Image (cartoon, rainbow, N blue to C red):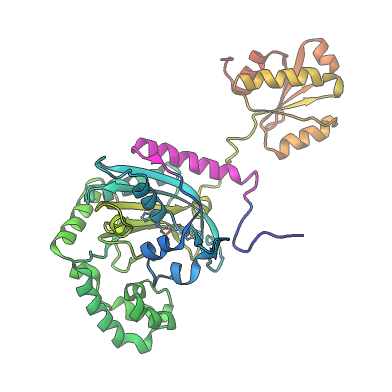
Amino acid sequence: MIHRIKGTQDLLPGEIEKWQYLEQKARDIFARYGYMEIRTPIFEETELFVRSIGQETDIVQKEMYTFADKSKKSLTLRPEGTAPVVRACIENNLLAGSGTLKLFYMGPMFRYERPQKGRYRQFYQIGAEVLGPDNPLIDVEVMEMLVRFLEELEIHPYQLHINSIGCPGCRPKYLKVLRAEITHALPQLCADCNRRASTNPLRVLDCKVETDQAHINALPASLDYLCEDCRTHFAVVQRFLNNRDIHYSVNSRLVRGLDYYEKTTFEITSDLLGAQNALLGGGRYNGLSESLGGPAISGFGFALGEERFILALPKEDYFWMRPEVYLAPLGPACFDFAVTLASQLRRNEIRAFLEFGDKSLKSQLRHADKLRIPFALIFGTEELHRKEIQCKNMRDGTQVTIRAEVSEIIRAIRGDTAR
Ligand code: HAM
């Protein structure tokens, strides 16, 4: 027996419908806001992630699935989608003179993390990137879209956290002060903080160790060191969030785990999740395109974890893509009719399931029930002789005799007439 790899999941019928629902809803909302889909390869040159996410980040240091292919080239299974999307835009010349570009993607990402509830080694992200001007209204529009998305999915409560971590102009000054303050606190801080103090001091702010919290809360905040441009940008973001009645809290410790961010960073968390409470995260990355050899174009985007959204969805029936009707022929003599009827129903856009085995009625109905199919059509030779069929409502157990015609069947299961 060969088992699946630790930190991965098989998504089975019964569960997968939630994923389809989530992805369809995402496609709907992206279309309304003018995004188009992009699909990039699952693996890329390792250098792409090292240069964009940052050499000193946890992702690059500890979490990447990196391997040499047969030509000894170093490849990495993508741990995130932003760098590949920007790489693809540069390579395919999508950024040249074409105004704002809005792209979305969905698919598996890979990180060698310690698996736990809501945290996997292969996980799925749905993300979007806006490449264009450095305009704070883009930041607000993305957040507004996400709030609308959560409302439409009926996921609540959730909290929107925002911060600004400055730009390459003002951040060095802040980092100098932060480093000095961290150095004072080092003896009281955990081993990870001690390591990060010199390599990536911003990440010290992200430490979750209980005993470190009081010391970290006392550290200086990037918001107090922003240059004029970053301060104005952040003020506009807040003003327009307020105008649109979008509730948020400013969290000066929200630094994110990828180095490409500048100015706005944001996350949406939910108490519906466990320790891994981030439903999604994102921010602005104005220098990324240039650092990958592309034009000087700004970017803003986010990615959400599908596994976490699935955990947070209301506990409803998500069997919406399932067959609507189960055809239960009573014996091989009825198969000819069953095959023709199934074909006619499908041509009328009815999702029909036909059992091919010669099964008893009892076992067919048990099967329909297991598949959560709402109606079963039951017919033996006697019924067909009378041009009749039994239509059983599997939810309430009621059964009616109807004419063995497509229009009648559609009326019975959909409550409307045939199209
Ligand atoms: P991230 O915060 O690393 O950002 O990931 C975004 C989301 O992916 C997280 O909030 C979480 O829901 C989900 N996620 C991350 N790691 C795991 C995991 N191991 N298991 C399950 N879910 C996970 C990014 O990836 C950026 N590329 C987002 C972005 C797009 N920023 C700008 N544009």
Q: Is residue 350 magenta?
A: no
Residue 51: give x, y in percent of width and height: 37, 64
Residue 2: give x, y in percent of width and height: 73, 60
Q: Residue at x 29, y 87 (%)?
A: 184
Q: Residue at x 34, y 65 (%)?
A: 259
Ligand 1 located in image quadrant: bottom left
Foreground pick, 173 / 45: 45
Residue 85: give x, y in percent of width and height: 39, 50
Can residue 270 be seen in the rendering of this structure? no
Residue occupying the far top of the picture:
386
Residue occupying the far left of the picture:
228
Foreground pick, 149 / 141: 141
Foreground pick, 338 / 62: 62
Residue occupying the far bottom of the picture:
187
Q: Which secondary structure is most common in the magenta stretch?
A: helix
- Relative side of 200 to 222, left or right: right
Total residue callouts? 0
> What are the residue bounds of the magenta stretch?
11-38
Residue 410 sits in which quadrant?
Answer: top right
Quadrant in which the N terminus is drawn: bottom right
Q: Please, is residue 300 above or below residue 168 in the view?
A: above
Quadrant in which the C terminus is drawn: top right
- Relative side of 69 to 259, left or right: right
Residue 33 sits in which quadrant?
Answer: top left
Can residue 70 be seen in the rendering of this structure? yes
Q: Is residue 36 magenta?
A: yes
Residue 345: give x, y in percent of width and height: 65, 20
- Relative side of 135 to 407, left or right: left
